[in-house]
Amino acid sequence: MTVADRIAAFRAALEEWLRGLYHGMITHPAYEKIEKEAEDAEDAFMLACFPDAFGIPSPVSYYTAELLPYLEDEFEAWERRLWDRDSLIERKGQQYHF
Amino acid sequence: MEQFVFFGGKGGVGKTTVSCAYGYKCANAGLRTLVVSTDPAHSVSDVFDQSFGDDPAPVEGVDGLDAMEIDPDDEVQRHLSEIREGLSEQVSAAMVNEINRQLEMSHGTPGAYEAALFDAFVGVMREEGEPYDRVVFDTAPTGSTLRLLGLPEFLGDWIDRLMYKRKQSIDLFEKAAIGDMEARRMMEGDPVLARLEDRKEFFEFAGEALREDAAFFLVLNPDQLSVNETERAIEAFADRDLAVRGLVANKLTPEPDDDEEGRGARYLREKVATERERIGQVEEGFDPPLLAAIESRTREVRGDLLEEVATELDVDPAPPERA
């Protein structure tokens, strides 16, 4: 193996590491953060659509019920998140991997 | 003149009688007329002595007059089963029960009945009412009618907010999809947004039709309660930027002949005097003009009596100016 080859191999490995590091430190947390935020926004939407699930009568629940057939995934995920959501701090804190 | 005419008023003042008489008058004036009742008690059937369903059917013996009756309870059931159908097509069996529970809950809320009624109203204005020159609505008692008429604006705002929230979350999901990852939700072709958009248009249509193509009349009886309620109703209509076109006084006591002096005649005379006072109060105190004063009948108004009442009803059925 020539020196040039070894340098090339080293650079390839380094590049991969750097990419991984960048992904792990920057992109992935960012993606997670945004997705969590999106989920929160979706929860707010679901809550506005179906407040009667919590015993709060809504003037539009008759109409929003029409959306139910299209909201299967959202509905399931919403319920799941409601079950295992801890405090807001904990949810917001999940994005920092200590 | 507007295509849609609403008769409202306190319960029991004779809205159905007046609406039917008005429909009769319109039909006689050569207008294709449809009388729509939303009273589950089916009183239009009683007036015309013929049963009607939720499709327009011609009234026997009157040319150009059709009638239909909407039962809000049926509407709620229909809506429910429509969604259920969609549910079984779209949703996996495991989730159906879960969602079904939610669905039933939303159709059991107090607003469901009103929403169904509103849907039915607007549906008639949009579709069934199309071939008619005049559609006469015999509405539910004042309170709920007013709430009903206030719905388009209120619900329109609500739907706007829902759409905003939905868009926000989809937008975030799209942003969360980095590189060639697929977003969990896409703005384009989102069925939920499409449904909300449909609803929004529906409410906009309703709001516009009520503002532009509808006339409102209030029916009252010559007693203090009814007059007071009418006063409140006129104010409430004004609050919603809807003007009451006119008032119709119904069930006036007939005056006895001068030479009668019995106990019955005295009773009637006194009653007529009080009623005059109330009517005077209405004529002077209220802005919308009193268009007709209909005398009380000893029999229920139906058949030939309807014609008499229609003659007394001085509401102009002028043909609408249609573009």
Image: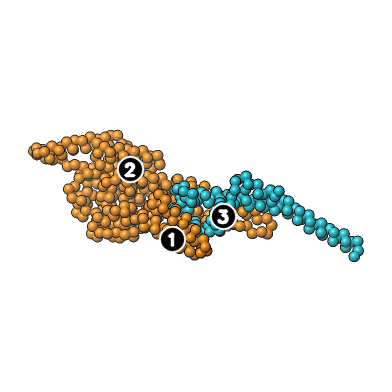
Chain colours: A cyan, B orange
Chain under disc 3: A
* Callout 1 secondary element: helix
Q: Are marks 2 and 1 in contact (CB under 8 Å)?
A: no
Give the residue type that dot 1 points to: Glu
Chain under disc 2: B
Q: Quadrant of the N terminus of chain A?
A: bottom right
Label 3 to label 1: alpha-carbon separation: 27 Å
Q: Residues within 10 Å of mark 1 (few under 14, many from 20)?
A: few
N-term-proximal mark, 2 vs 1 = 1
* Residue B245 numbered tag: 2
Q: Residue B78: where, in percent of width, then height?
A: 40, 59
Write down the residue under mark 3.
Answer: A80
Q: Are marks 3 and 2 in contact (CB under 8 Å)?
A: no
Residue in the foreground of this view, choosing between A52 and B270: A52
Label 2 to label 1: alpha-carbon separation: 38 Å
Write down the residue under mark 1.
Answer: B82
Nearer to us: label 3 or label 1 = 3
